[in-house]
Amino acid sequence: MGKMRRAEPTIIYKENEITKNIMPYISSIIITDNLEGTLDDVKISLINQKNIFLNNNWSPNKNERIEIGIKTLNWEQEKEGIVNKNFGIFYIDEKEFSKKTATWKGISAPLNSKNVKNSKTWESVTLNKLGEEIANKYNLEYQFFSESEINLKDLQQEKQTDFSFLNKIALEEGIKLKITNKKLVLFEESEFQKKETSIILDLKKVEDFRIKDKSNDIYDAVEVKEFDKIAFKETKVIITKEELEGKEPGQANKILKINTRSKSQDLYKYALKKLQQVNKQENMINITMVGDLRYYAGIVINIINAGIYSGRYMVKKAIHKLPNFTTEIETYKIGDFND
């Protein structure tokens, strides 16, 4: 008979694994993997027995790195053996203490990227090169996923943190930013949505789920306007929901109107991405299940046995909780993409 399945966290601090020393004190570890705009984070809750975590040698300092992982034994199959997975590197940015508890909170980027504000101008730069420049500044790996290059003109950063500035510029161009495990990623969400579905999730077999089907903040069309100060004229683009679905445009009763500040000047692509962004939360499913290492923000899954809500979904957030290993995911429905 095979060994009983188990899961436990692994914690590395100053290149030493400290899991064994602090395991008796761990109440919970929560790792949150976000798809866009928000840094990944970790929250470690500990039993502060006899104020042990008030001592320097028992608690990391702010801005110090900790690496969080998980070790499982026969978790998916009886004879699977030991599997190790790294959730990422986090920088301690907050600590809390009481007589009973100690809490460490960490984010997926160095604190100086969050706290230091900078100013700089670029006469001409691509979004790809801008992202690469900022990634190199913080010694991060870098990836860029977009179907086309995005050229930016007269860019100005004024007393902003580098990542908030980059995120703002990227969003204006319909591009998302993610920082995770020493990596900065700029991506066009539609490129991720084209990925093949690698997981089939049966809604009958999960611990719990919550479906949200909403009409508020869902639009039939988007209208984007831009005023050209040099030519002294206004340019306008309208894209309908039917066009996104490959149908003939119908009457648009609910129109999202935007005055763009896009630096790339491609109004059609900008309008297309904006309509995709605002309507992606029409159908959402949040799911709680037994811990599963396959789920992460950005993966495309196929949800079955959900009736009219069955179909392809993008995971926008994955939350893994230890030591009783559970996984929670937030997803939104996406269409079928044909290259």
Image: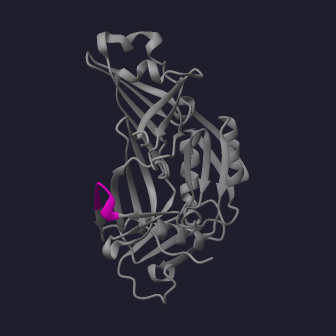
Answer whether residue 116 is visible to the viewer in this image. Answer: no
Residue 175 percent across, percent down from the top left = 57, 58
Is 41 contained in the magenta span?
no
**The N terminus: image quadrant:** top left
Tell me where the magenta segment starts and ends, as one range: 203-210
x 56%, y 66%: residue = 190
x 69%, y 56%: residue = 153
**Count of all numbered marks drawn on residues in the image:** 0
Would you place residue 337 above or below residue 183 in this image?
below
Where is residue 147, by image quadrant? bottom right
**The C terminus: image quadrant:** bottom right
Q: Is residue 308 left or right of residue 237?
A: left
Residue 121 percent across, percent down from the top left = 68, 44
x 49%, y 49%: residue = 37
Residue 238 percent across, percent down from the top left = 50, 78
Is 206 contained in the magenta span?
yes
x 60%, y 57%: residue = 187
Q: Please name whichever residue, 291 or 297, is drawn nearer the observer in this view of the structure.
A: 291
Where is residue 322, by image quadrant? top left
Where is residue 120, by image quadrant? top right
Would you place residue 57 above or below residue 9 in this image?
above
Q: Is residue 116 left or right of residue 52?
A: right
**Given the current orientation, which residue lies at the most extreme front position?**
1
Residue 306 percent across, percent down from the top left = 32, 70
Q: Please name whichever residue, 73 or 78, is drawn nearer the observer in this view of the structure.
A: 78
Answer whether residue 156 is visible to the viewer in this image. Answer: yes
Q: Please name whichever residue, 130 or 76, is drawn nearer the observer in this view of the structure.
A: 76
